Image: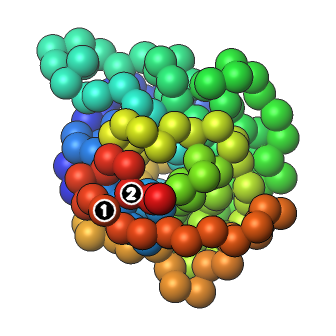
């Protein structure tokens, strides 16, 4: 998903939302995409929120000629994390803490979203897993990357052909299972 759709809104807290134009590629470790932080508000802005990064099953074709919702958590079936240290689970329709404060990001930081074949989401910053997110992301349909530019984050760029970092260890409480790559178009890729 090298292209994206931008809402075009700009303000003091809601800076814009981005929806990838194509399904995420699937790797052995699951689905992954990454953005680079291009602009942050000054450290003295006192913004509690930072960007939110996640996925949705809502195809961008549903928005041709229409505006995206004001915030990505308003998308049908969306899972995201960041915000003010919170995560949104669109399957459960609930908010909870994620322990990651993206308002502390710096320009040039690379922020990724990884979804495992078990449907668990993780935030990755500069190659390291920084937080565990929702655990109910479906694996049986295409996933599209979403980013909400809120609070301290003003601008990001998608990283073309991003791959999950080899050094990112995903914490797991479950028994290890075999993962196989069966698709690169964002569909089910785990067995």
In front: 161, or 115?
A: 115
Residue 114's place in the image compared with 169, above or below, is above
Residue 155, percent across and down? 42, 50
Q: CA distance from mark 2 to mark 1?
A: 5 Å
Residue 162, percent across and down? 35, 70
Q: Secondary structure at mark 1?
A: loop
Which of the 4 quarters of the picture holds residue 178?
bottom right
**Which residue is drawn at the image coordinates 76% and 39% (left, top)?**
86
Residue 100, percent across and down? 76, 55
In front: 151, or 77?
A: 77
**Which residue is drawn at the image coordinates 62% and 24% (left, top)?**
91
In contact (CB < 8 Å): disc 2 and disc 1: yes
Residue 47 in view, yes or no: no
Q: Which mark is residue 182?
A: 1
**Which residue is drawn at the image coordinates 24% and 53% (left, top)?**
185
Residue 119's place in the image compared with 116, above or below, is above
């Amino acid at each position: 998903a090298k292209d994206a759709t931008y809402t075009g809104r700009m303000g003091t807290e809601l800076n814009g939302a981005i929806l990838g134009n194509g399904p995420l590629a699937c790797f052995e470790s699951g689905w992954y995409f990454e953005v680079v932080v291009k602009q942050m508000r000054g450290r003295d802005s006192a913004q509690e929120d930072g960007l939110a990064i996640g996925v949705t099953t809502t195809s961008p074709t549903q928005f041709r000629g229409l505006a995206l919702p004001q915030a990505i958590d308003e998308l049908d079936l969306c899972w995201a994390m960041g915000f003010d240290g919170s995560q949104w689970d669109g399957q459960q329709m609930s908010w909870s803490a994620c322990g990651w404060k993206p308002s502390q990001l710096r320009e040039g930081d690379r922020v990724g979203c990884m979804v495992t074949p078990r449907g668990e989401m993780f935030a990755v910053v500069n190659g390291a897993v920084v937080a565990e997110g929702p655990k109910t992301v479906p694996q049986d349909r295409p996933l599209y990357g979403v980013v909400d530019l809120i609070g301290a984050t003003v601008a990001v760029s998608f990283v073309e052909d991003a791959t999950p970092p080899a050094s990112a260890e995903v914490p797991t409480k479950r028994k290890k299972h075999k993962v196989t790559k069966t698709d690169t178009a964002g569909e089910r890729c785990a067995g």
